[in-house]
Amino acid sequence: MLDTRSKPDKYSFTFVISSSARRSSVVHGQIVHGMVVKNGYLQNLYVANSLISMYAVFARVDDACKVFEEMPDRDVFSWTSLVGAYTKNGNMQRASNIFWEMPLRNDVSWAVMISGFVSCGMYNQALEYFHNMISKMKPNEAVLVCALSACANLGSFDRGNWIHVYIDKTRIPETSNITTALIDMYSKCGRIDHAYRVFDKIPRRDVQNFTSMISGLSIHGLGKQAIRVFHQMLAEKLKPNEITILGVLNGCSHTGIIQHGSSIFYNMENLWGLVPKIEHYGCYIDLLGRAGFLAKAFGMVKNMPISPDLVIWRALLSACRIHRSSCFGERVMNHLEQLDLQSCAGGDVLLSNLYASLGKWENVARVRKTMGKEKNRSEIGCSWIEVNGFVHEFRVADSHHPQIDEIREKLSEVLKRVGLVGYAVDSTNASFDLSEEDREQAVALHSEKLAVAFGLMNTARGDSIRIMKNLRTCEDCHTALKAISEVYEREIIVRDRSRFHTFRGGECLCVDYW
């Protein structure tokens, strides 16, 4: 159009600015911005709104603010786009201030704020805004999906279930996005039965529905059921996507289903035209490692066409620890050190724990001496439990909870009772430089044990106890929780960094394969 010397108008500028927002760089948008100024269209509401929206996509808050401030007139879209620029930039405080300054807010404005909180990991704030919104207007699909995502990340079954009831009561159509979010929420809140109930009622399921159900079954260690749903999906002539395959491989990994996992991994490209990405390699290597095929897993890592990341190396080292193979653990660490010292971050901790589990304390000391100051700052174990709609957080050896004295007293009583049925503290993974008594005390105060004690104190007899944890559950806590579920006749559901553990009657559904 410019080559023909035709003059662009407000419509052509609006369209081309919107197109610029879909480019990989903000440069195209900046060039068009200059042309807007040159042609005198910056005062036009729709053109200016498009510019703010475009800058918001690239989180260019200063540029978005400048356009906003120069506008003679503003509408709800102008304000919402500016809020979006700040949420995209992660500045939720400034976004909130602008949001409450808005003379008028619509459902899109609320959706931008709530999704911004979810993107920043501020899930409780997202739910606060959600409940504030529904007291004023009916939420749209985007808001409901974000609210359910917040519940999923918090493991907040009560609030997630309340949203589901709200959807039913207000007769909001259960679109594919909403049903997918419901399945994901129930799965991540430890209620795979509710997730399957939602899935089973969908009249016409799509790839997203199937993928969410498969992933949910997988994180619960129900690999065979995940494969069954996967084959059901194929029977309905639906083509899996990359996330679907990742979910199936994850289920195979947590259940030790080597044959199916290998078949799916090696046929990704031939059957479904999907080239394996690093996440797929990571899942398959984890599957091999957990099953004890350490040599094959190590060989695949060294020969894979994609450069392995830290997650893959850690998965391999974790497999070495599971199978007590210090020989392979040392080989992995030696290989890492030859590649790049930075790649060893976290690996030395795993190797140290591997030696500790074998009682090789001299080797533990040697590894710890080589660890830099940064490497010593391992992530602190945290657990969360929801009781009566409130989420309570516990850290290892916590001393800040208002009821901590009663909780510790209750935990001491619990450990004594489970000791009578054979439980004994396993302190092999505690810090090597502590005395045996101190090591036992450190393990006894792990965050999930404190959370369980709190749950026993504050929930009715027979109620399930649901806990979230940021790290992998240790062997001692796994054993203790099995014993507690038997002695106290409680179902205890723990979601750790990689999967769910469901303890009932002294057993875990993972069958100690984790």
Image: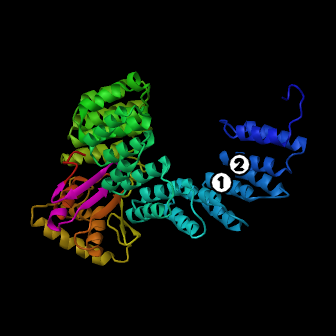
Question: Please, what secondary structure does the residue beneath circle 2 have?
Answer: helix
Q: Which residue is mark 1?
A: 84
Task: Give how far apart the Cα atoms at labels 1 and 2 are.
Answer: 8 Å
Percent of width and height locating residue 4 = 88, 25
- Seen at 23% across and 38% down, the residue is 256
**Amino acid on which the number 2 mark rests in the picture:** Ser
Percent of width and height locating residue 349 = 33, 47
Residue 476 visible in the displayed image: no
In the foreground, 274 or 317: 274
Judge whether residue 404 is colored magenta: no
242 left or right, relative to 513: right
Dot 2: few (<14), some (14–19), or many (≥20) neighbours within 10 Å? many
In the foreground, 138 or 84: 138
In the foreground, 242 or 300: 242
Dot 1: few (<14), some (14–19), or many (≥20) neighbours within 10 Å? many
Percent of width and height locating residue 156 = 40, 62
Q: Which residues are magenta?
A: 485-507
**Quarter-wise, where is residue 160 in the image?**
bottom left
142 left or right, relative to 104: left
**Amino acid on which the number 1 mark rests in the picture:** Gly
Q: Which residue is mark 2?
A: 53
Judge whether residue 500 is colored magenta: yes
Q: Is residue 14 above or below residue 484?
A: above
**Quarter-wise, where is residue 226 in the image?**
top left
Q: Is residue 18 above or below residue 181?
A: above
Q: Are marks 1 and 2 in contact (CB under 8 Å)?
A: yes
